[in-house]
Amino acid sequence: MELFLTPNGRIDQPTYWRAVWILFAISCALTAISAFVSPFLGMLSLIMIWPWIAVHVKRFHDSGKTG
């Protein structure tokens, strides 16, 4: 869970791509569920912004750039 919650640290490329695929799958599932169940469930998608930021910042750190 630390991979998705904190922007501190570094991650290698395979871990980065695993995290991207996991986040993409969760985002797609939330979109599909909100389309069929309730549009207000789409608001849960806003929660997904932070994990995306955390994963990308860690990858920036690994490439020597600031997050």
Image (cartoon, rainbow, N blue to C red):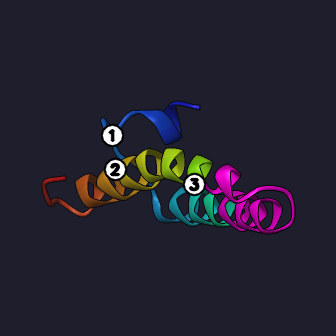
Q: Residue at position x 45%, y 55% from top?
A: 52
Q: Residue at position x 42%, y 45% from top?
A: 50
Q: Work out whether 18 lies above or below 55.
A: below
The image position of residue 28, as x and y in percent, is 72, 68
Q: Quadrant of the image for the N terminus?
A: top right
Alpha-carbon span between mark 2 and mark 3: 21 Å
Q: Quick check: marks 2 and 1 in contact, CB under 8 Å? A: yes
Specify whether 21 is left or right of 13: right
Of all residues shown, which one is farthest toward the left?
66
Of pointers 2 and 3, the one earlier in the residue sequence: 3
Specify whether 45 is left or right of 63: right
| Magenta stretch: includes residue 32 | yes
Q: Which residue is mark 3?
A: 45
Question: What mark, if any, has residue 58 been given in the picture?
Answer: 2
The image position of residue 8, as x and y in percent, is 30, 35
Q: Quick check: marks 2 and 3 in contact, CB under 8 Å? A: no
Find the magenta span and give its range.
25-42
Of all residues shown, which one is farthest toward the right?
36
Q: Secondary structure at mark 1?
A: loop
Q: Which residue is mark 1?
A: 7
The image position of residue 5, as x and y in percent, is 46, 34
Alpha-carbon span between mark 2 and mark 1: 6 Å
Q: Residue at position x 57%, y 64% from top?
A: 20
Of pointers 1 and 3, the one earlier in the residue sequence: 1
The image position of residue 42, as x and y in percent, is 63, 57
Q: Amino acid at mark 1?
A: Pro
Q: Amino acid at mark 3?
A: Ser
Q: Amino acid at mark 2?
A: Lys
Q: Residue at position x 75%, y 60% from top?
A: 34
